[in-house]
Amino acid sequence: MRKTFLLFLLLAIAAGGLWTTTDADAQLQHQAFSAVLNPQRYDDSDDKIEVVYFFWYGCSHCYDSDKTTSLFLSSLPSDVRVVRLPAIFDPNDDSAFHARLYYSLRELGAELNLRTNAFLAVQNMTVSNTPAKPSHSYGLISKQAQESFAVANGISRAEYSAAYDSDRVIDNLTKAKEYYDAVEIRAVPTMIVNGRYILPYSQTFYQVAEQLINQERERLASGEAQ
């Protein structure tokens, strides 16, 4: 998988795509990443380098980059632990419903297979990237709407309802919101590298993420604590 991503990266560079070939240190200096004011990891249960990926089903950039991001995250070495977190901007807005959709689908083991469908349904788009209906509002912002989405995608209403109301989904929502607030991100998609660096989306998103991961690996190898 890592070879696949690196080949994809080289092809993108050759085609004049998303990434540049400037010196790695120069990229780090000019990249708009910042330090987390109060460094903290989402999960301290192991000593792996943690990469948290914040996204939102209502974010067009998250949808457009999802395949490349998924390929990059799955290509990371075994000493890196990846955590996908749905951004919850406000517990009372649409993003909270969409975060609950993510965790409910994940609870049912269906999120990966239905991810594209979820993005499209939330953004009221069709597979051809045209509006499914003339609306500027987001879709799937009620339990009933999400149950109907689940049924349309092969999940029974009762199964989805049970997942939606489960303690584990509610606990995950609470933890995701707490971490979102703690690291103080302002946009999605964004990566948090080992609880120390905030990396918002840009043309060098993946290259700089890998450089920061390597930097953390070297720091930990020198004997510094997580």
Image: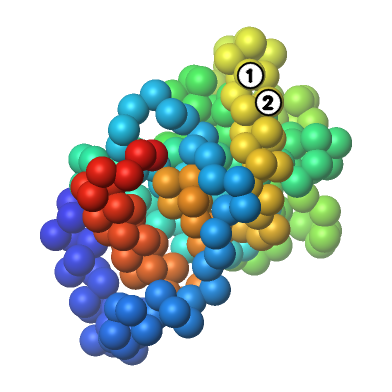
Image side of residue 205 versus residue 129, left or right: left
State which quadrant residue 155 falls in. Answer: top right
State which quadrant residue 153 falls in. Answer: top right
Residue 89 image offset from top left, x and y in percent: 75, 46
Check disc 2 and report the residue beneath it: 174
Residue at the (49%, 38%) spot, across then down: 41
What's the CA distance linking mark 2 and mark 1? 5 Å
Check disc 1 and report the residue beneath it: 171
State yes or no: discs 2 and 1 in contact (Cβ < 8 Å): yes
Count how many numbered circles sit on residues in the image: 2
In-front residue for pair 54/110: 54
Residue at the (24%, 86%) spot, across then down: 14
Residue 2 image offset from top left, x and y in percent: 18, 55
Callout 2, which amino acid?
A: Thr
- Residue 44 visible in this rendered orientation of the protein: yes
Image position of 46 with respect to 18: above or below? above
